[in-house]
Amino acid sequence: MVSGLVLVSSLALALVVISGDVAGQPLKAQFNFLAEGPNGFPQLAITFERSKIPERASAEAAFEVTPALTGDFGWKDSTLIFNPSGKLAGNTDYQVRLRGGLRLVGGGRLNYEQSSWTFHTRSPRIIYLKKEGQAVNIWLAESGKTSNPAPARPLTFETQRRVLDFSFSPGGERLVYSLEEPDQQQAGLWLLKIPQLTSESPVGSGAGTGAGVNTTPENKDVLPAPIKLVLEAGVRATAPRWSAGGDLISYERRLIFKGGVFGPAQLWLVKSDGTSLPPLYGGYQQSGYDLQWAAGGDKAFFWEPKLEAIGIFNFTGEPKWKTMKGLIFGGMAPSPDGQEIIVSRFDYSGVQQKKILVSLSAEKGKTAADWEPSLLQPPNEAGFNYSAPVWSPDGRLVAFSRQEVGPKTEKKDSRIWLYDPQSGSSWPLIKNDSNLKNFSQGTFSWSPDGQRIVFETYQSGALANSETTQLWEAPLDSKETPRPLTGGFSPRWII
């Protein structure tokens, strides 16, 4: 009899949960994950039935993500939108949950068991350039750490024109590239949606309780046509840089004069829909190049050769200037938080010309003019060139190129080194690289999690962008052996 009463009670409770009673109604909602939402970042959304929209504050308080993510909430009609403040980890299962007991806007409450949905992010990928005859195309490959990686595939199919440079959106779904015309003078900007590789899980795939999941797998065999962003007669548009905020693309615009002479670089802006915007800085009398965005997209750094100064632009008026008179600029890398800059410069003070690295830092609230040399400086040993600094995504380390200075007729090997700005210590990325003797380690890129680096290898003294250039992948953990990936150059690692 007791067992029968328990069974009857359980059935009654199940009916209440399913159909709702006077005090509660069942949840009807749909979850959707976009690897790149309208603002260029990943986006998580839960759409409620219009007649059962919960109070916004209670819904936001009941929202949970595992592994944990920080971010901001927003609403669009009956949809709760969560925008993560940082990048999601690659090849990871995330679980989204709503705790029970939400109150409805019109009164009453949603009475249901905790609902959850799961989605999986794509594996890290590597985009690189590959020389094919006279042309240079963009290729896509998976990391060598991926089990059963899919074959690399081309994203462009040029036969004469050359891709010069590229940059991708914060969500890793689109890229913009500079394409040089056959005259090797004029160049424009084009936008391309990045397809999935065949071994990848469809972005947004998952399953949930209490709701469905919208999934729209891409057609993996058909590439969308590139979209023209900038293409002007007599103009060379190069060095595109997608802002960390996802809304703007900067580029260097040069006029082409008679005889094929290029004018000075000017920094211009364009939106991803092709809307042209005014120059980032000044007019035709000013110049600027090597623009670098800080995390968040609300600050940009660039070099102004006429003023001999670093410009720091935060969209609130004219740039602030850190004047560095007499500096022969060789590139720079701002830290992810925008509070430190590693500058590469030429040094003529010794017997032999060399490149060195200089670190500048600013306390929060200080102006650009108050930036001073950091307490700890990168290594600049005699007999070596130091260049091409790049910060790790978490701002913990700086990778740079270190090349022995030799006679002009002798090309020395270059190696990738790591520098810790907190301790001042430095060390080679690969401690035992005897299998790369007489080969240089060239352009490189950090993995999104900051644990690996992909880099070029080419015979010392040869050109880095030749058909023989190879890409290798190395972990920061020296216990794992570096491995070759594929042929190509100028690699960039994205999710």
Image (cartoon, rainbow, N blue to C red):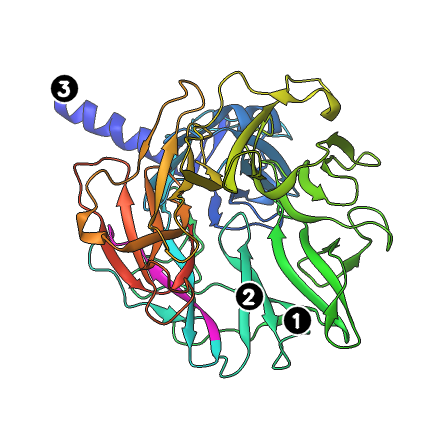
In front of the other: 221 or 391: 391
Mark 2 sits on what residue?
164
First in sequence: mark 2 or mark 3? 3
In the image, residue 339 sits, relative to residue 31, either above or below, namely above
| Percent coordinates x, y for residue 344 in the rendering | 55, 39
Mark 3 sits on what residue?
2
| Percent coordinates x, y for residue 381 in the rendering | 41, 30
Q: Which residue is drawn at 48% across and 78% down?
A: 135
In front of the other: 116 or 131: 131
| Percent coordinates x, y for residue 389 in the rendering | 48, 39
Label 2 to label 3: alpha-carbon separation: 78 Å
- Residues drawn in magenta: 136-146
First in sequence: mark 1 or mark 3? 3
Q: Which amino acid does label 1 sit on?
A: Ala
Do callouts 2 and 1 mark residues in contact (Cβ within 8 Å)? yes
Tag 3 secondary structure: helix
Tag 1 secondary structure: strand
Circle 2 packing at 10 Å, graded few (<14), some (14-19), many (20+), is some
Q: Magenta region, mostly helix, strand or loop?
A: strand
